[in-house]
Image (cartoon, helix red, strand yellow):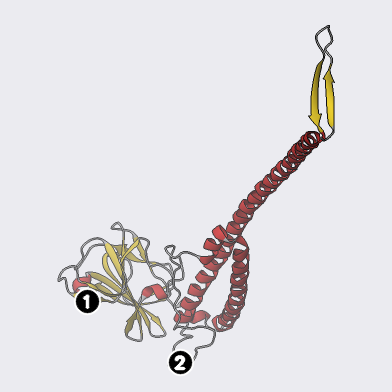
Amino acid sequence: MGKRFTIMVVPDRSSRVRRFRISRASLWSLGLLVFATLAGVTFGAIHYFKAIEKLAENTKLRRQNVELRTELLQVHEKVSSVQSVLDRIQRFDSKLRTITQLHDPKRHLAVGPFDASQPDVERSDAVIDPVVLAIGEQPHLAIGLLGERLEEIITEAERREGSIRQLEVVLRGQKVRLASTPSIWPARGWVTSGFGSRTDPYTGKSTMHRGIDIANQPGIPVVAPARGVVTFAGTSGGFGKVIVIDHGYGLRTRYGHLSEMSIRVGERIDRGDLVGKIGNTGRSTGPHLHYEVEVNGVCENPMNYILED
């Protein structure tokens, strides 16, 4: 028989002494159980505190990720703003090249880096920007994409700078021509019909609209967009009261549907001088100014010449 141990419990008072006999094997089992329990509690406590520490670390990382995404979105907005400025510069550059005929193939003046085959296209908000998508899902990938876009913008800015410098040299020698080039709005209002093919409001048929229509209240001033000489001031068929100004260099402008004419044939005018007022004369569906720009006898889109926003 294995050894046994006797455990005596002696009460404080005269109660009977209690004896408990336990074998060595049971004692060992009890000891192992206590050890295992203490080990389990210790391991559990360590695991718990590590979990608390990891939770705190994850919370910190999530907060940092939110801050990173916010900063990336702010950087992206600034990059997009710079891109918008460059786009406006390109449009301005293109218009300057149009009015100075720098990209006219007949004049062989197509100095770089103008590329008429790549018209400026407005960015559509409907297209999901890959940078914005990456910011939401993979911020570190977004950093790389923003870096690439910044490199593209820097290259583009350098190219535009070279283009503007070329224009500066050309424009210095064309002050007289520029003063005679229609480059401002002839009247304030809303462009209700653009240049090009449209449906005739009277016949319903497709016709060529050789200018732009600027609608506003009758009596709104109409000004000369450049210096020139008045070659016609009178009534002309469906255009009602019409003024034609010859600016030289093959450039002429026409103003139709006027209510009043403030200048006479042969009169010399400067940019900004009053020539008439918006009206509803002739074949018109409402008060507006019909404005045309003619280059060497061919009507061109007046919007290509207006440098103002």
Task: Say what amino acid the circle numbered 2 marks.
Answer: Arg
Q: Which mark is residue 107?
A: 2
Q: Position of residue 181 (x, y in %)?
A: 44, 77
Residue at the far front in the pictured view: 1
CA separation, marks 2 and 1? Answer: 31 Å
- Compared with residue 121, is residue 279 higher up or lower down, i.e. above or below? above
Q: Earlier in the sequence, mark 2 or mark 1?
A: 2
- Of 126 and 21, which appears nearest the observer? 21
Please rate how many residues cluster around mark 2, counting C-alpha atoms within 10 Å: few if below 14, some from 14 to 19, many from 20.
few
**Residue 150 appears in which quarter of the rendering?**
bottom right
- Of 171 and 61, which appears nearest the observer? 61
Mark 2: secondary structure: loop
Q: Which mark is residue 247?
A: none
What residue is at 50 percent from the left and 80 percent from the top? Answer: 176
Image-based side of 248 in relation to 289, left or right:
right
Task: Say what amino acid the circle numbered 1 marks.
Answer: Thr
- Compared with residue 190, is residue 307 higher up or lower down, i.e. above or below? below
Image-based side of 208 in relation to 271, left or right:
left
Report the label total: 2
Mark 1: secondary structure: strand
Image-based side of 170 in relation to 284, left or right:
right
- Of 182 and 271, which appears nearest the observer? 182
Image-based side of 298 in relation to 124, left or right:
left
Q: Position of residue 222 (x, y in %)?
A: 35, 65
- Compared with residue 110, is residue 215 higher up or lower down, i.e. above or below? above
Residue at numbered disc 1: 207
